[in-house]
Structures are given as C-alpha cells and as structure tokens.
C-alpha cells in the first residue's frame, strides 16, 4: 500500500493503518532498533511501541515522508530504551562508542547530549550534512544515526576499514569546525 493511503488510514482512525504499517515497515524499523538494542525481544517491544506512537502522532501530524517519520520515532524509542537498559552500566556498545567519537569534535559538555534533540542543533547538523559529498554523508549517517559498526559500513561502501575510519575522523573534524564557525560550540 502507498504511504499516502496508509497516512489516510491513520487520519481516518482505521485500525488497519497499524497492520499496513507493520507489513510495509517492520523490517526497516527492526533494523533501526536492532542497531541500537542488539536484542530481538527488546526490538519487538520497541516496534510495538513505535506503532502505538505513530497511531498517537497521526493526527495531529500529517507526515509527508512516512518512512522518515516512522524511522525517527523508532530510533528515538530505541534510544530511550537503550538509555533505560544501560543506566547502570556503561559498556563498549555501539551507541556509547558512537557518542564518544562525536564528543571529540563537539566537547564533553553533558548539555550537548541533552541539546542533541533540540531543533536548532539538528538544523545546523543537517545543513552541515547537506554540504558534504554524498558518500561522506552516507557513511556519517550510517555510523552516527544508525550506529552501524565501521566494518559493516566499510563492506557496504566497498571501502577498507582504515579508509572508513579516516573518512569518519575527517568528517567529525569538519563538523567540529562547522559547529565552531556557527557558534554552537566554543
């Protein structure tokens, strides 16, 4: 079913909207959630929470890009669940590692993590990403949005691991310089 028809089902409050969403986006959402949580049961719970959150969000929202809308909700719910599950332990998982890598260019200020969701910072980072070459942007998004391991990114783009790491480091450096220039960080 086309996305606009699925959205219309939500707007009409037709319960078939959830079934259609699940049929079309379950694998997509599962991959997003699994890249954060690494546990099938936790992912399944998050997917159910995602469908409920989408049901509650449409209306009043009327998303133009349903995949992005659902993906963002799923990612945020997965990150919230990860924070809850890892509140007592800070291990070497991919999410922590990705945030730790970004701290090198953004700073270790705790306010950054809190402000990560703020619209102004999001817009600034989106502007930065729009100025990158497509391959740099794709590698950066895979690492820091989807939390993919460097080795998986290297395989996906047919790069060596060292090239991928260097590309990520250079992009982080560019991001730091851009954020300083924009006055986001000092």
Image: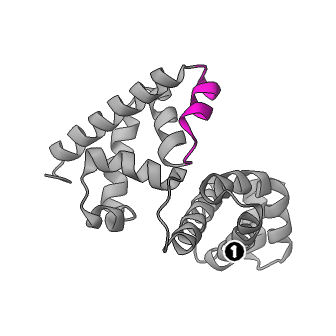
Q: Secondary structure at mark 1?
A: helix
Residue at image point 20% right, 54% down: 184
Image position of 42 (left or right of 36): right
Q: Is residue 20 above or below residue 150?
A: below
Predominant secondary structure, magenta span: helix
Query: Pointer 1: what residue?
Result: 49
Residue at image point 67% right, 56% down: 38
Verify whether residue 53 appears in magenta. Answer: no
Residue sitting at the far left: 186
Question: Where on the picture, by quarter, is residue 46?
Answer: bottom right
Coordinates of residue 41 in the picture (x, y in percent): 77, 67
Q: Is residue 57 above or below residue 118?
A: below
Image position of 176 (left or right of 157): left
Region of the chain picked out in magenta, as a range: 146-158
Residue at image point 65% right, 75% down: 53
Coordinates of residue 128 in the picture (x, y in percent): 33, 40
């Amino acid at each position: 079913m086309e996305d606009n028809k699925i959205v219309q089902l939500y707007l009409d409050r037709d319960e078939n909207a959830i079934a259609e969403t699940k049929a079309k986006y379950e694998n997509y959402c599962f991959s997003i959630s699994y890249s954060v949580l690494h546990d099938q049961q936790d992912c399944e719970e998050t997917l159910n929470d995602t469908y409920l959150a989408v049901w509650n969000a449409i209306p009043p929202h009327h998303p133009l890009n349903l995949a992005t809308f659902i993906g963002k909700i799923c990612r945020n719910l997965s990150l919230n669940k990860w924070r809850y599950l890892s509140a007592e332990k800070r291990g070497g998982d991919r999410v922590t590692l990705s945030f730790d890598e970004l701290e090198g260019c953004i700073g270790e200020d705790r306010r950054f993590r809190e402000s990560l969701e703020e619209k102004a910072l999001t817009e600034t980072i989106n502007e930065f990403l729009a100025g990158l070459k497509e391959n740099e942007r794709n590698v950066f998004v895979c690492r820091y949005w989807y939390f993919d391991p460097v080795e998986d990114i290297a395989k996906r783009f047919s790069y060596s691991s060292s090239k991928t790491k260097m590309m990520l480091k250079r992009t982080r450096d560019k991001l730091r310089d851009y954020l300083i220039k924009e006055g986001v960080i000092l």
